[in-house]
Image: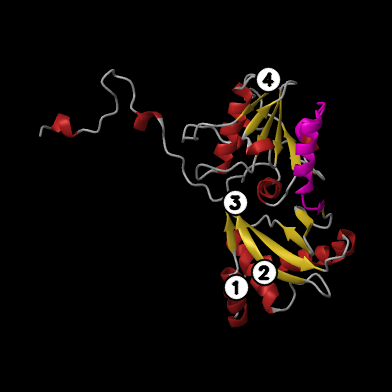
Amino acid sequence: MGKASRRRRTTDDSGAPTARQRSAPVPYVNRPFEGLPQETEWVAIREILPAATASVTFADGRAPEGAERATIATVLPMAWPAVHRADGTVLVGTQSGSTSGDPSRDLAAQLLAGAAAEPGSAVQHVPAATGDTPRLQDLLDTTAAFEVEVHEGFDFWVEGQDLDEEGRASLDRANASVVPTRRMSALPSAYWVRIGERTYIRLVLPDDEDHATDALARLHAAGETSLGEHTRLLGAFRACGLLVPVFEVPADSDPDTHEDALGAFGTRYAAALASAEPLTAAERRARSGLLSRQVTLR
């Protein structure tokens, strides 16, 4: 076989680029929302909040044609990737599923698909992102605040619209599935949630997950991971490259009763994170225990 026959083809018989040349693979990104404002809030809205929204601002010259405004949401009706409202607002559902190794690129693809859709319509399928798809960091103003609003239900789906009886019944069923969730104020990205007969506080830590695990191990070995009497650290899960500790608190307790203890935990955690000392034997055992209970959310 001649040399010309062994060369990798980059064009088809018409001379057009092949699919391999047109579509670069999507590189895996461990912290897909790093570089966006409030990275921990991006992780929270994608991974742990049932019903929440946040408005985003496009960078100068990067607003997609047809998108006057954009809102990031937890989930949309029927798990649609995006909705283009009649008023020009594009809604993107972060929990509709990721198809590549970079959720930032996937959400950017959903945003672009929503902008391209006809106003008043929903996007039911988004072509898979490629290495050429821009990321949210390319489209959005990274100096603008990302302020997440937690909702008691999904009424934001139909904001400004009148529903018939069937539509209202469907919305009521969706609202009934939402677990009570409230933002804590003592630390950023901390949320109180009641699931069934148990109550938890989930905290998205902003630090490298390995360093955060070391810090939690130091605290756990010292018996300093609780938020007070009748509370305990159940463990932590990994989400979008960050660590999310989960504390169980008394089922009937109000979020306000844990604010001081949560703030004190934040002070202890910061000190443990700043330590440059090698982990002791007890701390290494605590770290192994934490790792054995970790779950990675994807």
Secondary element under disc 2, as helix, strand or loop, is helix
Residue 46 screen position, x and y as percent: 66, 46
Secondary element under disc 4, as helix, strand or loop, is loop
Residues at circles 2 and 3 in contact by the CB criterion of under 8 Å:
no
Give the mark nearer the N terminus: 2 vs 1: 2
Residues at circles 2 and 4 in contact by the CB criterion of under 8 Å:
no
Q: Is residue 265 magenta?
A: no
> In the image shown, does 20 or 281 lie closer to the viewer?
20
- Looking at the picture, does residue 18 appear above or below residue 252? above
Give the mark nearer the N terminus: 1 vs 3: 3
Q: Nearer the viewer, mark 4 or mark 3?
A: 4
For mark 1, does the 10 Å Cα neighbourhood hold few (<14), some (14 to 19), or many (20 or more) residues? many
Q: Amino acid at mark 1?
A: Arg
For mark 3, does the 10 Å Cα neighbourhood hold few (<14), some (14 to 19), or many (20 or more) residues? many
Q: Amino acid at mark 4?
A: Pro
The residue that label 2 is drawn on is 216
Left or right: residue 270 versus residue 228 is left
> In the image shown, does 94 or 208 lie closer to the viewer?
94
Q: CA distance from mark 2 to mark 4?
A: 48 Å
Q: Nearer the viewer, mark 2 or mark 3?
A: 3
Q: CA distance from mark 4 to mark 3?
A: 32 Å
Region rendered in magenta: 157-182
- Residue 119: give its label: 4
For mark 4, does the 10 Å Cα neighbourhood hold few (<14), some (14 to 19), or many (20 or more) residues? some
The residue that label 1 is drawn on is 287
Secondary element under disc 3, as helix, strand or loop, is loop
Residues at circles 2 and 1 in contact by the CB criterion of under 8 Å:
yes
Residues at circles 4 and 3 in contact by the CB criterion of under 8 Å:
no
Query: Is residue 148 at least partly visible in the picture?
Result: no
Colouring rule applied to residues: secondary structure
- Residue 240: give its label: 3
